Structures are given as structure tokens and as C-alpha cells.
Amino acid sequence: MHHLIIGAGPAGVRAAEALRAYDPQAKITLIDGEGEAPYSRMAIPYFLSGKIGEQGTWLHRPLEFYAENGIDLVRGRAAKVDAGTKTVTLEDGQSLSYDKLLLASGARAVNPPVEGLEGDLVHHCWTIDDARAIEKLAGKGARVTLMGAGFIGSIILEALVMRGADLTVVEIEDRMVPRMLDETAGNMLKAWCEKKGVKVLTSTRIGGVYEGGGELNIALSNGETLKADLLVVAAGVTPNIECMDGTGVEKRTGVVVNARMETSLPDVWAAGDCAEGCDFSTGDLSTLAIQPVAVEQAVIAAKNMAGIEAEYHCALPMNVLETLGLVTTSFGKHDGLEEGARATLLDADEWRYIRLEFNDGKLIGAQTVGHVSMAGCLRGLIQGRMPLGPWEDVLKTQPHRVAEAYVDLSRGVS
């Protein structure tokens, strides 16, 4: 039996580990498209900030782990999958056959349609190679503009500040992290960053980027022009699924999978950022680019590839973000339902905010600012679909009592 895995990120590597445990005699091949030691993208900001060295981003140290565990690490990018002949062709022309295939090809950073994003002073922060380039340009006092204040952008923001950069953030939406936080929470995060010395321009678009004299001139929609030594682009990602073109596989934004992480093709599974599976909050399909989800999906896929029946019953949208010391979170249907109810509690002076979303006697979503200890309780209430009973009325007037509610409900007390 030959298990072939496209992608050597957290999902691919975790799947290879699991397959070795569940199918000890099988041949396992892991295709690495970057030519690097397999690493975690989520560790890149820690490398940039100086908290870890480059080897600290590796998923396994030493690199001999793969050979010692009988995992063949092949360098190259998958160009085409032929499900009929069960082969994968790499960009260099090499062809690999498989019995069972896992697509764990992840996602890549995208460029918005803005003139001038191809210059030497413009970089994404998605690969370790990107991070090496940023490290050279974003020294102490360097004028850096960050395009995008979403989840990834806000993580990069902290790393750039820790490097001593003179940082300006430009976000097209009216608040920071708009897909995770409402107007109140997003603008609290903006005020916090400004308090820490970061200039944050929301409701602002970059219209063009022009390089000259060793610096960038960045034209903004508000009429201003920023001068910068570096522009970091954090404007979103898109799944790497082009190698599946022509296979007839069902796909939307990503490749569609069922609860067993199977695609619509026989003997082909998918996991991680390239997979589109069930969303816990809506019941619909969605891609959830969250590393814990990716590795959980990878293990489920590996079990089924090895003949062990297992299912992954919907991923809970969940984000916990720390930015310059302020923790923000969102869980589940954090923007609520029209037919549902909502409770909020704001203490702007103490940088604290809670928003709870209710429907049908349950907590279905939440957002918080500054409430670190509440995260586990919120996740438990939402993911457990716990009937709140009398606690619903309590939480609607006293949202800060979430932990008490969770403890009581977990013990069967209402």
C-alpha cells in the first residue's frame, strides 16, 4: 500500500505520522513543495520577532525524523493529479503513483489588484522565505506599511513592532480583524495598537505602490502618500487546488470533503486549508484555515486511508488572537442570527468587552476582548450545544458569569 501526501505543512506531516502508526507496513511519501524543512506557518511571526530561531519553526527536529520513520520526503510541486491512473505529476516532470492520496496542499497568499505589488520592497509574510526577506528589511526604525489587519495581519503586526519598525497598518474595512470582531471589538483593538505606537488607518485602500530612490511611495484612497522601506501584504489566502483541475473532483473555494475527509474521487482525501468541509455554526461547507482544525482533519483522513473508520463532525470556527498584549477571541456564530438574542458588556477603560449570541436556549457564538480565562468555557458551551436553562436569562444580563454557567452546566446543575 502506497500512501501519497501532497503538502508538507502541519496537515501533511501529521497525516504521515498517523499513517505510520495506523499502517506500519505501508509506503508513505510526503511531497514538499517549498524545498524547506517542513515547518509551521503559524511559527513564522515568532521567528520574525526573534522569539525563536529558524529551526524553531520546523515541525520536527532533527530532520532525520522522516527517514527514521520510513517517510519519503520528495521535493517538488504537484502539477497534476490523474485519478484514473492514480498518478501525481510534479512540475519537474517526475511522476509518482499512489494507492491512496491525501491532498494537504494548504493555501497561498494572494495579491489584491493593486499596481506595484511586484517590487523588491514588497513581500507577503506567508512562507519562511518571505520571513527571511522581511527580516533583512524590517530593522529598528525601518518605515514599514502593513496591508491588511485581518487575523494573520494582526499576528504579523506584533512581530514587526517587536523588531522596532515604524509601523503603519492600512485596512480596507472599517475595523481591525473584520471577519472575527464586530465594530466595538475591532475598534478597541485599533485603539490598543495606536496606544502602543502603531498608526492604524481603517476604511482606507492602497491605490498604488511606486518604487523609486530605494523607497516606496504608497498612494492611499484618503489622498495621503506613505513613504516606506517595506510593504508587507497580508490580504488573504486562497487554497492550492490547481493540481486537481481536470479530475472532476467536487470543489467550491476548496475541495469538498465529507465527514471521513473523502473527496468525490475514489481513494482521494483532503485535509487542512485546501479542504472544504462542514462548518459547525452553519452546517454549510466552508474552508477554515485554522491549524488545530487542519491537524484534526489530517488524523481523521489518515485513519480512513488506513482502513479505520472515523468521522470529523464539523469544525467550530474559533480564533484566539493576542496583539501587543491584548487578547481577542471569537467562537462559533459570533455575529449571531437575526432570530436570536444578544448580550453585551463593555468596560472600555479596562479594555474588556463581551458579546454573547443566543438561539433556541443555547449559546451559539461569542466575541471577547481582554477576557483570557473565558475562552475554554465559551468553547465548551458552544461546541457542546449545552441547553442553558435558567442560565440563559442570567447571561443575558450578566455576560461575565460565563465561567460559572459552564461549571454548573457541566455538572448537570441548572
Image (cartoon, rainbow, N blue to C red):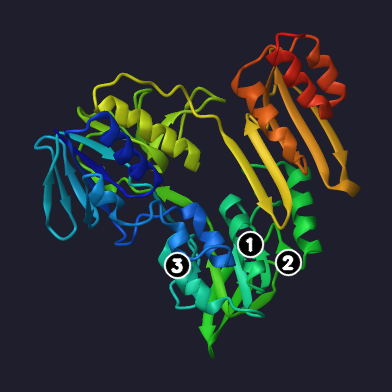
Mark 2 lies on a secondary structure that is loop
According to the picture, the residue beneath numbered tag 1 turns out to be 157
- Percent of width and height locating residue 27: 16, 39
- Percent of width and height locating residue 89: 15, 50
Viewer-closest of 116 and 240:
240
Looking at the rendered image, the quarter that the N terminus falls into is: top left
According to the picture, the residue beneath numbered tag 2 turns out to be 198
Q: Residues within 10 Å of mark 1 (few under 14, many from 20)?
A: many
Q: Amino acid at mark 3?
A: Asp
Q: Residues within 10 Å of mark 2 (few under 14, many from 20)?
A: some
Quote the CA–CA distance across marks 1 and 2.
Answer: 9 Å
Q: Residue at x 73, y 67 (%)?
A: 199
**Quadrant of res 339:** top right
**Quadrant of res 386:** top right
Can residue 116 be seen? no
Q: Residue at x 36, y 28 (%)?
A: 300
Residue at the extreme bottom of the image, as rendered: 213
Looking at the rendered image, the quarter that the C terminus falls into is: top right
According to the picture, the residue beneath numbered tag 3 turns out to be 130
Residue 185 shown left or right of residue 152 in the figure: right
Residue 18 shown left or right of residue 154 in the figure: left
- Establish if 209 lies above or below 266: below
Q: Earlier in the sequence, mark 1 or mark 3?
A: 3
Q: Amino acid at mark 2?
A: Val
The reply to whether discs 1 and 3 touch (Cβ–Cβ < 8 Å) is no
Q: Residue at x 9, y 37 (%)?
A: 85
Mark 3 lies on a secondary structure that is helix
